[in-house]
Image (cartoon, coloured by chain):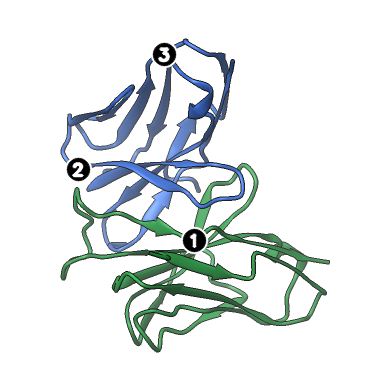
Amino acid sequence: NAGVTQTPKFRILKIGQSMTLQCTQDMNHNYMYWYRQDPGMGLKLIYYSVGAGITDKGEVPNGYNVSRSTTEDFPLRLELAAPSQTSVYFCASSYRQDSYLPSTNEKLFFGSGTQLSVL
Amino acid sequence: TQLLEQSPQFLSIQEGENLTVYCNSSSVFSSLQWYRQEPGEGPVLLVTVVTGGEVKKLKRLTFQFGDARKDSSLHITAAQPGDTGLYLCAGGGLGSTLGRLYFGRGTQLTVWP
């Protein structure tokens, strides 16, 4: 059972370059998320999706784009990379039944992260 | 603005000691989750609490959700080196921003043998 798979594991970009961080899950989860984690700052939500074809902004969406064409995949696109986007990026997924409220049984599954450096 | 404040930020203790980490907010959450993260890996869910005053125990870990659902604590009894990691709390169901989890900055715990 693969769970949430992120690629690549590491990447170095030059300022102004673009790239796509891939995320796929095989658990048929409806919710998917992208977070970034900076040292000492916890996890900040970039974008999230409640199902295929539906995405919404999180706390720090500027400089990023997402799409959700299938239940399984939720790629994160960086256009015109900037040093401020140097961070560790985590994709996550969860299942919720017809409700925005998490329940006792809800569990957020995280990928192992992508370490991105923009130089 | 950090909605969830965790304290302490760093904690370094000897094996066998007890410890408590705190997660506080001025906002009311519908649920509170605790995660543990090891270097190079994503966070792993430990527990979800949804009822004010709720207490959950997982072996040597005790989690409590405040009566007003604004704060939570994690208590570890007889800490072991395997407990070392970053502990994150996350609140969900906040007002109009339903569907999102808000994370604290984390408590980095180091347990020395």
Which label belongs to residue B50?
A: 2
Left or right of A53? Residue B79 is: right
Q: Colour of chain A?
A: green
Look at mark 3 in the image and give the residue it sits on.
Answer: B78
User: Which quadrant of the figure contains the C terminus of chain B?
Assistant: top right
Whole-number angstrom distance, CA of label 1 to CA of label 3:
30 Å
Left or right of B33? Residue A4 is: right
Q: Amino acid at mark 2?
A: Val
- Point 33% across, 22% down: residue: B60
The secondary element bearing badge 3 is classed as loop
Look at mark 1 in the image and give the residue it sits on.
Answer: A111
Q: Do callouts 2 and 3 mark residues in contact (Cβ within 8 Å)?
A: no
Q: Is residue B62 above or below residue B47?
A: above
Earlier residue among tags 2 and 3: 2
* Mark 1 on the same chain as mark 3: no
Q: Do callouts 1 and 3 mark residues in contact (Cβ within 8 Å)?
A: no
